[in-house]
Image (cartoon, grey):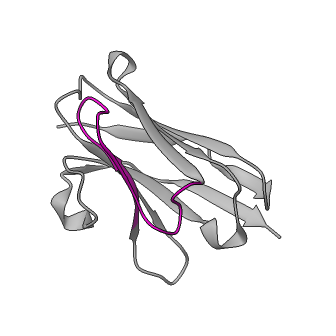
Amino acid sequence: QVQLVESGGGLVQAGDSLRLSCVASRTFSTYPMGWFRQALGKEREFVAAISRYGISTYYADSVKGRFAISRDNAKNAVYLQMNGLKPEDTAVYYCAAGATSTRSAHYDYWGQGTQVTVSS
């Protein structure tokens, strides 16, 4: 069992930046990782994913060029650097372990989520 804890969310203005962190309860270098988000009243959607050792990264078209996913296996952590935030980025952001898929069902473990709110 792996427990994931996200942090770094908050209320920002359009154009600002935030860095989300997700720390795992134990060594997770064997797990590919992903970030998803869910806006109020909408389906959970894929944001980004990273392979086990950070060689490969994947992004949703909506965040490509603005967001960057990275990981530090020595710290059991994965990060999501979000630049140029837009109001439509407002959502609860979740980290997940177990795949680099765009489909949430392919992931084994989930964090509790952190709220990101972007005002216009």
Image point (46%, 64%), residue name:
37
Quadrant location, the N terminus? top left
- Quick one: which residue is furthest to the top in this view? 74
Q: In which quarter of the image is residue 107?
A: bottom left
Q: State the residue in front, 51 or 28.
A: 51
Q: Quadrant of residue 51?
A: top left
User: Does the magenta segment cover residue 57?
Assistant: yes
Magenta segment range?
A: 46-65
Residue 19, horizontal then vertical, whole percent: 61, 40
Residue 63, horizontal then vertical, whole percent: 53, 61
User: Does the magenta segment cover residue 120?
Assistant: no
The answer to whether 103 appears left or right of 20 in the picture is left
Q: State the residue in front, 73 or 7.
A: 73
Numbered marks: total: 0
Residue 9, horizontal then vertical, whole percent: 63, 48
- Placement of 89 over or under 81, stated as above or below: below
Image point (64%, 73%), residue name:
88
Q: Could you tell me what secondary structure mostly forms the magenta stretch?
A: loop
Quadrant location, the C terminus? bottom right
Residue 85, horizontal then vertical, whole percent: 69, 59
Q: State the residue in front, 73 or 117.
A: 73
Image point (71%, 47%), residue name:
17
The answer to whether 97 appears left or right of 65 in the picture is left
Image point (23%, 29%), residue name:
28
Q: Quadrant of residue 59?
A: bottom left
The answer to whether 33 appears left or right of 61 in the picture is left
